[in-house]
Amino acid sequence: MDYYQHGRVSFSSNFFCTLWNWWEYSSNIVLLYPMAWTSIERHFIIFHHRLMSTRRKRFFFHLLPLFIASVYPLIFYFGAIVLNPCKKQWDYDE
């Protein structure tokens, strides 16, 4: 947004752009994956209510998938964006 107001990139460094891309992609998917899982989980609760009957089943069908859906994108995009060995060329004029 700062670019649209001032016509320049405030923090034009490789570190900032890499961090910005990692945060942007990760935050989008971290919000999307749990939402997708909760829609699947709603189906389980309505049609397969025995999957949530014990504490152990609730852990494996409710808490663990939500945890994985929240942590996996952070780790994946850290490897795909931050640890990527390719040289990054940022265009600060667009």
Image (spheres, helix red, strand yellow):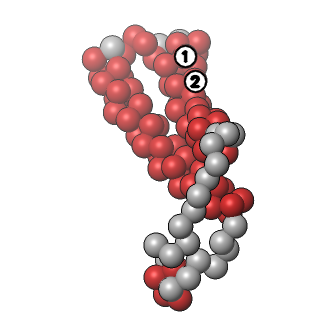
Position above or below: 22 against 73: below
Q: Residue at x 47, y 50 (%)?
A: 28
Image side of residue 52 versus residue 13, left or right: left
In the rendered view, does 11 fall on the left or right side of 6? right
Q: Is 29 situated above or below 21?
A: above
For the view shown, which residue lies furthest in the left direction? Answer: 47
Secondary element under disc 2, as helix, strand or loop, is helix
Distance (Cα) linking label 1 and label 2: 5 Å
Mark 1 sits on what residue? 60
Q: On the picture, is 46 further left or further right than 38?
A: left
Mark 1, secondary structure of its residue: helix
Q: At 64% across and 48% down in the image, what residue appears?
A: 87
The reply to whether residue 19 is in sight is: yes
Q: Quadrant of residue 51?
A: top left
Q: Amino acid at mark 2?
A: Leu
Query: On the image, numbered disc 2 is attached to which residue?
Result: 64
Name the residue nearer the viewer: 85 or 47.
85
Query: Looking at the image, is 3 positioned above or below residue 54?
Result: below
Left or right, 88 with reference to 48: right
The answer to whether residue 70 is seen in the rendering is no
- Observer-nearest of 20 and 58: 20
Q: Horizontal and vertical percent for residue 56?
A: 58, 12
- Seen from the viewer's position, the closer of residues 10 and 43 is 10
Do the residues bearing badges 1 and 2 touch, measured as CB atoms within 8 Å? yes
Residue drawn at x 66%, y 72% is 12
Q: Position of residue 94 (x, y in %)?
A: 46, 73
Q: How many residues crowd around disc 2 within 10 Å: few (fewer than 14), some, or many (20 or more)?
A: few
The residue lying at 57 percent from left, 23 percent from top is 64
Image position, residue 65 (x, y; %): 52, 25
